[in-house]
Image: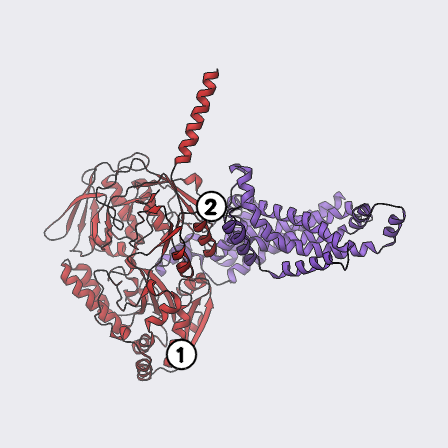
Amino acid sequence: MLNFIARRILATVPVLAIVAVLVFLLLRLTPGDPAAILAGDAASADQIARIRISLGLDQPIIVQFGIWIGHLVTGDLGESFYYKIQVADLIAQRLEPTLSLATLTILFSVLVSVPLGVIAAWRFGGWFDRALMGFSVMGFSIPVFVLAYILIWIVSLKLGWLPVQGYKRVADGFWPYLQHLILPSITLSVIFIALIARVTRASVLESLGEDYIRTARAKGLRESQVLIRHALANAAVPIVTVIGIGIALLIGGVVVTESVYAIPGLGRLTVDAVLARDFPTIQGVILFFSLVYVGVNLLVDLSYVFLDPRIRY
Amino acid sequence: MNRKIIAAVLLAAAAGSALAQDKVLRVVPHSNLAILDPIWTTAYMSRNHGYMIYDTLFGTDDKSQIKPQMVESWTESPDHRLWTFKLRKGLAFHDGAPVTGEDVVASLARWGKRDAMGVALMTFVERMDSPSPDSFRIFLREACGFLLEALGKPSSNVPFIMPKRVAETDAFKQIDDYTGSGPYVFKRDEFKPGDRAVYLKNAKYKPRAEPASGTAGGKNVYVDRVEWNLALRDVQAQANAVVKGEVDIIEALSFDHYESMSKEKSVKVLKPTLGLQYMCRFNHLHAPFDKAAVRRAAMASFDQRQFLKAQVGVDELYKPCASMFTCGTPYASSVGTELQSKSNMRKAQELLKQSGYDGTPVVLMKPTDLQSIGKLPDVAGQLMRQAGFKVDLQAMDWQTLVSRRAKKDAPSAGGWNMFCTAWVAPDIWSPVNNAALDARGDKSGWFGWPDGPKLQELRAQFMRETDESKKKKLAEAIQAEAFQLATHAPLGEYVQPVATRLNISGVIMSGLANLYWNVKKN
């Protein structure tokens, strides 16, 4: 097991190295000059050229890459062209909102979708099952921003229950913090509830057809025990896998959600960095996201051991 | 013991109450604030940040007149070559140090290396000095007709006055000390890029006695704290937030929300006096726009109303204006504007035939992510096609466009022929600072690189002229020559509406910059 973890952690090194090279090259091939953006609309070509020199963008790409990698191996993600702040500090500043939003979204999604999926499988073909399938099609189809505007209009503007936008840090008080996260989390959860509920339903449905379920029922266990201890427990591997994939999908989802709800998180930082061609920040954020993705995948793989005793590493 | 506890509770309650009574003005700026050095960049957000924390020697009032601000009085020698300025009493930086002539000289020297008008002014300046702590002098090589205009210019780059130690920073390196002497103090520790910027009232600031007008007059602050919400950039979310009362001011209300916000009971919609000018810029270096006749044919096809209707859409927010200098400002005129003011398609078709246009496609760059100007290229492309041009409309994001427009390569090698943009009034209202009129060929400061020795000579005369009526005549001649040369095509003007909550008053709506003194929150 420890060997497996060590091998997986070591395997992240080449993955991150490939990501680093690809991101660096792609950004340099993308049209757009950070110096022109920084200089402002009324700046002259000469001013832009001088800023380009000050950023080191006049150097050959290989030299720029060497400098960046040199810093990266020492853990230095560099300084943002745009904000003149260390990229690591920028990521740290934006981590709390995104982490809060993602955690609440995943928690909410799992707590809602897994029971729904189990009930739908249990009542396969009934009205509940059909309603859930209908909801999941809607959940997949409705764009995040449309759902956000509808929720804001009803919950915030018409009912006045929750704020329209913004983010409060935990340090500002738990209720304000939560108040600002409820709508964004619900918005972002809908697609995950749809996804996880469908997979849970399919997976539990498959388990319910197995011999051990018939045996459990024959032993006289309560239906709830059959569903949770036997059917759900045996269906857990694909569900956990989907939750893991969901976290990766979440990274894309937060970009839109953070924009609509004005949450200063990593998604918004990424968009701003891309628009400003802030190369060090884009590189840093993508590397960070890659690291998170690799980490989540590792955790998902490890969870299999606990969920299915037949799996050994 | 009990008394101590009661006293502590009362003190805490008083402190809490004081905090609760703090007037906080919550503003949604038009963009993100990233660069905190308003001399290093021409970005308008950095300029507005500058107005919060720095003061200026002169200001521009809402009639576009230059008025003293930090300066108390000044004299000019009979040959117009020596200017002596005396500073107002009681001017002090946020750290308590008095503002001196040496601070002014250092600040002007740095600004004069970055700003286009500053650079032009410095060609006249022989030297500057500070004979006493409360005065400074500018010695000129020859008479200069725009010295006060330059010192009081309201838009980027504004000659803000910084402490000497800060102003001595290399002009091409950003400052990291934000000590100013303006009406607000920047809360560096609360600044979170992309999230919020906070400014506190500078209690020691001594405003002028005159009423606030444009960037001039008394900078009285009636709120304790101004918070710029930098995260709220979705236009629908902005509208929702002002309706719900979560923000007080939206600096740039989208045109799409103008009508609905105008009907909203809890919100006021304000319109600035001066607007912005749309323009399309030709690249004079490459075919087909290397020929004036071809450029003039394109201009003749540009009916301003069609651009304005498509881009702005709300009748009361736009007006056609053929002048190259913002309508309603001192140098605006109709001299030489017939090509634009009487544009029509038949004339454009005739002019294009006469020009010998060979069918070279026009590479027209269209920004897809900038709502404020994104429709202009579509209209320009369609009108030019109707006139007989072949148009290659290329969509890209604005940042790609600003990078590409700096390239002098041929359109086939990654260059361009035309793009459209918008300028705020004070950036184009004078022949000196209107960058589109810089006609020094490929040495021109702004993109497009027109070559017009006659236009340059007229601009040079304007810069030297000190008689206001002669300057007006020269401005007319400059405009006529610019139309002849077809440097660029003005496409009309619009105003950017501002939305505020009903309890907000005193917002300065000059259109010069977004300013937050004089604002009251009841």
Disc 2 designates what residue? A85
- At x 54%, y 43%, the residue is A179
- At x 62%, y 62%, the residue is A141
Q: In which quadrant of the rendered image does the C terminus of chain B lie?
A: top left
In the image, farthest residue toward the top = B1
Q: Residues within 10 Å of mark 1 (few under 14, many from 20)?
A: some
Report in which chain the residue with disc 2 lies. Answer: A
Cα distance in 3D space between marks 1 and 2? 47 Å
- At x 39%, y 59%, the residue is B258
Report in which chain the residue with disc 1 lies. Answer: B
Q: Which chain is red?
A: B
In the image, farthest residue toward the left = B78
Left or right of B187 on screen, residue A171:
right
Q: Give the x, y percent position of residue A32.
A: 46, 61
Residue B191, visible in the rendered structure: yes
Q: Give the x, y percent position of residue B12.
A: 45, 27
Name chain A's colour.
purple
Say if B383 sits above or below B179 in the image: below
Amino acid beneath label 2: Ile
Q: Give the x, y percent position of residue B143.
A: 15, 55
Disc 1 designates what residue? B385
Q: Give the x, y percent position of residue A17.
A: 61, 53
Left or right of B173 on screen, residue B329:
left
Mark count: 2
User: Tag 1, which secondary structure?
Assistant: helix
Q: Residues within 10 Å of mark 2 (few under 14, many from 20)?
A: some
Amino acid beneath label 1: Arg
